Every structure is written in C-alpha cells, then in structure tokens.
Amino acid sequence: MSITLPSNSKMLTSDFIFGVATASFQIEGATNVDNRLPSIWDTFCAIPGKVKGADNGDQACDHYHLWKEDIQLIKHLGVDAYRLSIAWPRVMDEKGEANQAGLNFYRNLLTGLKAEGLKVFVTLYHWDLPQHLENKGGWLNRETAYQFKQYADIVTKELAEWVDSWATFNEPFCAAILGYELGIHAPGLSEPEYGRQAAHHILLAHGLALPVIRKNAPTSQVGIVLNMNRSYAASEKAEDQFACLMRETLDNQFFIEPLIKGQYPQLLKTVAPHYLPTILPGDMDIIAQPMDFLGMNFYTCNHNAYDAEAMFKNVKNTEQVEYTDIGWEIAPHAFTELLVNLHKQYDLPPLYITENGAACADEIVDGEINDEQRIRYLDGHLNAVNLAMESGVDIRGYFAWSLMDNFEWAEGYSKRFGLTYVDYQTQERTIKRSGHAYRALLNSRHA
Ligand code: IFM
C-alpha cells in the first residue's frame, strides 16, 4: 500500500515543501528542568478527571533529551521541513526576561535541524501558557497579549537566524474555545462569552507580535495557523441549514475574517451578539495586518442539526462513512471543498497545510506497525490538496501530523497520530508503515 499523487502534480515539484509537525508540550517532557515555569497544561493535567488516564506531560516523548535522535528520525523520513513550537514557560521568566537555559535547548535544536539541511517552521504558541499569566486572567486579560509581544520579541531576537517561518499561534479556536468556552482544554473554563474574548485577545496578540517578528526576523515569513473543519447541514431543512451556517461562522469565519478583513462576522451582530467580544478602538487594524502565509490544519468535517438553545448540535453522518480511532469522520472531499471555498471567499495569502493526519489504534506486531488506515487517510488528503491546487488555491506545503505519537491533550497518550510509533516505557521510536509510505512518496520526487 502506497501514497501516490498524479505524476504531473505541482506538489511533486521542488517548490512544494513536505514536512512533519509536533508541538512542545506534546513531546518535550522535562517539565521541571532549566528553570521552566509551570504551564496551564501542567496544572490542568493535575486536576482529576480532566485528562484520560490521568496522563501528563512530565515525560511525554522525552524529546528534550532525545532531540538529537529525533533530528535523525526527521531526516530519515525524507522531509524538507520540520514544524515545532517553542514553550513560552521555558524561555521567559516571571519578570519578562529571557531564560537562557531554556533558549539554549532551542538554539541547539534549531542549529541541529539546519545542519541537516531542514527548513524550520516555528510556532510561538501551541497552548502552553505560563501558569503565572493564567493566574492573572490568562487570555481573558488583555495584558496577556502584550506579554506575548514581549515573549515574541525575546524568542525572535535570539533564534531568528535559524528559522524560515514563524507562526504566532496554533489554532486560536482550540486555545480560546476549547479552553475558555467549553472547558475541555486548559485552563478548563466554560462561559460562552469567555471563549470569544479570549479569542479576541489571542488575535490581538498575533497582531501586536507581527511587526516585532518582522523587525527581528526580516528574512523569515510570518503568519498564523488556523484549524478548520468543513461544516455540513444535517438536512435540507431551513433550520438545519441555519445550524450549519452558525457552526461555520463560529468555528471558522470568526477566526479568519478578522485576520483578513478586519472584522468579526456581521451575522453575529443580529443573531448572536453575545458572541461578540469587547473590542477597543484600533484593535481590528492591529489584527488585520498582511501576513506572508496562512497555516491551515484540517482533520475532519462535521454535520449540524438545529438546536433551540445552542443554535447547532453535532449529529452523525447518516451515510456509511469511515472514522478514525478518535471518532473523526474521514472526509478528504471536505478538505478540497473547504480550501476552494476559502479561496473564493477571501483574498488569501499563500497557504501551508500545517497539520493533517489520523489517530489510529496502532499496535506493534513483530516489530512493525501496519497502519493501513493512516496510509489511506494520507493518500486521500494529499490528493485532496492536489485537487484544491488544480482549482487555483495557492498551497505551498504540507505537514503531516505528527512526526511521532505524543500527548494528545485531553485524550492523554491514548490516541496515536504519529508516523512513528513511540513506546512510552522505553522511548523507543519505530517508523510505522505510513512513515515509510510518506518517505517513499517524497523520495520519488528525486528519482
Ligand atoms: O494534537 C493536536 C495538535 O496539537 C493540534 N491540532 C490537532 C492535533 C490532533 O488533535
């Protein structure tokens, strides 16, 4: 079983970048070394019942110590680029000063990646907010956006020379809505108004940091990473169509529209004004500055029926479809549709697919992991990207999520997204069949 693209695909040309992605808290472990401060995820993991199996990030993949081996693993997969995130609590102390011990880890990692000829895509915020900032209100406190600007300044001043691409945030939807509105991610708050206000401060932080990053890293590209699912209505009924529109507006448009058009969706003003955050004069101009790229993370689609209280509720697809081990529908056609629709709706900067992948119930048998479903998933979604490009969407790269199995947030270590299997007892890494298939596709480019 292999991953194949049409031989004339633009994705097979040297301009298109293939990579693998990870995030700091999900892989690093070593939460208590080199003056790292506690993060909201350390706190959240310690609350009984919040994370499956009471798992936490203390060990994770021990990447903090195994980074040299992991660079070799990345190299072995034949990718052009590696996407990682920096842990804010490792590199900035409570007074807002640089923590050189934490920065040294990233300096070593980044120079190691560059020495292997890899392009480096860095995300500044992949959800590990320092706990001391959460104690002052976290993303509900406007001041956190200014703290982020300071953090971005420290990191980009110190590390710019090894970084090709900077993303301010990964998935503001998850950080704000899962964390402050639905309470299923750290810090675990759940008020409808909180989520949107947190989102506004995150977008503001993005806009405040952009000029700082540009100044410190003039030769790198700068952007942000959003996650989007394609929304469908459960039926043709007007009320289900409305439910779908609201889902799409609140999950997707709420995040992209301010970035590209400098406004929140106008529909909310009339239909759900309580979902509009408090905005100070000038905020929208700060948020809507031009970006060099937009990162897009895609995994699945959703189906929506009308709900009198919440406006929409999730329902299952009535057709026979396949799901991954995390219960997400496999829908590559939805990926193409989403990308083409965005291209029609917005004047987009170049896109990178910064995450895409599948959680599968992987098992090692005789030293091998035959993750056939993941291979089919990757094949379908890479071809979906190719179709979007054929329809005129400007996509410059694709990153598989993830380099290796890791801490899957509220699911703990129970869900495996890696191209590489991690034995959490021994920290042994074994490339899965999907990793070999990905590598074969990438190597076919040079054959
Ligand atoms: O593991 C996460 C990642 O941190 C952010 N995007 C989605 C992935 C799978 O849930």
Image (cartoon, rainbow, N blue to C red):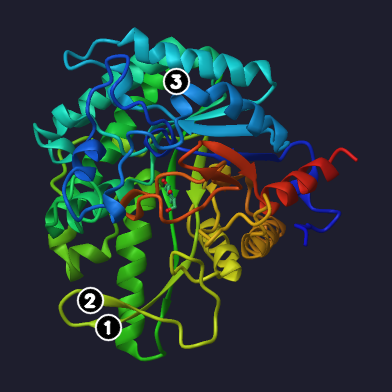
Disc 2 versus disc 1: distance between alpha carbons?
A: 6 Å
Taking the image as shown, residue 424 lies to the left or right of residue 390, namely left
Disc ID at residue 311: 2
Mark 3 residue type: Arg
Left or right side of 98 for 111: right
Residue bearing the label numbered 1: 306
Q: Amino acid at mark 1?
A: Tyr
Residue bearing the label numbered 3: 214
Q: List x then y, in percent, for residue 146.
A: 21, 25
Q: Nearer the viewer, residue 416 or 5?
A: 416
Establish whether ligand 1 lies closer than 8 Å to the Cβ of label 2.
no
Left or right of residue 90, residue 187 in this image: left
- Tag count: 3
Gap in Å between the C-alphas at discs 2 and 3?
41 Å
Crowding around mark 1 (Cα neighbors within 10 Å: few <14, some 14 to 19, many 20+) is: many
The residue under label 2 is which amino acid type? Answer: Met
Q: Residues within 10 Å of mark 2 (few under 14, many from 20)?
A: some
295, above or below 227, in the image: above
Residue sitting at x 39%, y 51%: 256
- Cβ–Cβ under 8 Å for marks 1 and 3: no
Q: Dot 3: within a 10 Å radius of its alpha carbon, few (fewer than 14), some, or many (20 or more) residues?
A: some
In primary-sequence order, the first of circles 1 and 3 is 3
Q: Position of residue 277 (x, y in %)?
A: 16, 50
Toward which corner of the image does residue 212 lie, by quadrant?
top left
> For this view, does 376 lie left or right of residue 335?
right
**Dots 2, 1 in contact, CB < 8 A:** yes
Outermost residue to the right: 447
For marks 1 and 3, give the CA distance: 44 Å
Q: Which element is circle 2 on?
A: strand
- Is residue 89 or residue 68 the one in the foreground? 68
